[in-house]
Amino acid sequence: MTTISVIKADIGGLVGHSTVDPEILEFFENELEKNDLIGDYFVAWAGDDISLILSHNKGENHPLIHELAWRLFNEGAKIAKEKKLYGAGQDLLKDSFSGNVKGSGLGVAEMEFKERPSEPIVVFLMDKTEPSAFNVPLYKMFADPFNTPGLVIDPNMNKGFDFEILDLLKNKKAIFSTPEESYALLGYIGNRHYAIKRIYSRSGKFPEREPVAAVSTEKLSLIAGRYVGKDDPVAIVRAQSGLPAVGEILEAFSKPWLVAGWMRGSHIGPLMPVSLENAMISRFDGPPRVVALGFQVNNGKLEGPVDLFEDVAFDRVREEANKLAEYMRMHGPFEPHRLPEQDLEYTTLPQLQERFKERWEDLE
């Protein structure tokens, strides 16, 4: 069995929230190169977030793998603090390791599976947004035949998929099956307080409850009890042979979906698919970005990556995202560009309400 773990954190930005420090990336590379716990690795980034893409045979939630990531991010944060990088160590919410990285501030997407004769996967990295930003693309990939014709013409996909959904506010989960429960599924995931955590194939081609997609759903503000940075989720999606083709997976990002995050985690903006080279964020600390890295998993080795959004076929999506960014910015401090009061990560409204409470009078 092979396990793919993608573990990420923001441990300091260069400059501001723009990007990551090359010296810290090199530190992770050097440390993982000499570690014998893992079979293979790739160090990636999006905006000011670093992601460790790890292949190993330890299974999900393994304490040794999680401790390795926790230790490296803490050591990397020390370098960030020495260099006075912005927000150095901001995602690290625990001073000690407690068996896994749950509640530590690190984001995790993992899946264990038996490798098929050919095992392509796509790892997605997002910056300046939240876990529910994956809701629309994943629904398009695994439940929308207008995006994924394989749902109609591939007999191994006809039975549909099971979606595991998390209620991020109440810490609950439920599973909905498509296509028969598609409307119920949409009723939930159309609300950004619900997020897709995992997707399972219902085809006999795959073992029961073997995941074919996984998302990091950690909400930093709920863990810390305060705003410490946007969640910047990551995801793993398996492809081909009874699953959406790589092209169908990427087609789900052919429109710049509006997502929450952007500046100060408090604005709606377009999700722009970009190459790794263009994963630095800039305008208004954004717009929100997504990177797609393709790998062939070969007996635990990660062949690749292919920088899938580097293709010029996504130039028009990026152009449309820039136009949408211009339109949303035009609204300034007004909704719907600014998030509703209850969803704001930064807000002075409680102070304003206290300061001006005597000014408000009852209507006669």
Image (cartoon, helix red, strand yellow):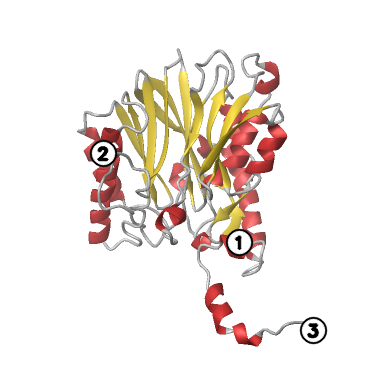
Q: Earlier in the sequence, mark 3 or mark 1?
A: 1
Distance CA(mark 1)–CA(mark 2): 37 Å
Question: Which residue is drawn at the image coordinates 40% and 22% (left, top)?
Answer: 297
Residue nearer the viewer, 256 or 57:
57
Q: Residues within 10 Å of mark 2 (few under 14, many from 20)?
A: some
Numbered circle sitting on residue 364? 3
Disc on res. 339: 1
Look at label 3 and name its amino acid: Glu
> Residue 323 appears at what percent x and percent y?
65, 55
- The quadrant of the image that shows the C terminus is bottom right
Quadrant of the rendered structure where residue 1 is?
top left
Q: From the viewer's perspective, is residue 168 above or below residue 114?
A: below
Please tell me the numbered disc located at residue 68. 2
- Residue 319 is situated, as x and y percent measured from the top left of the image, at 62, 49
- Measured as percent of width and height from the top left, residue 294 is found at 46, 30
Secondary element type, mark 3: loop
> Mark 2: which amino acid?
Leu
SS of the residue under disc 1: loop
- Where's residue 123, x and y in %? 46, 34
Looking at the image, which residue sits at the far left?
34
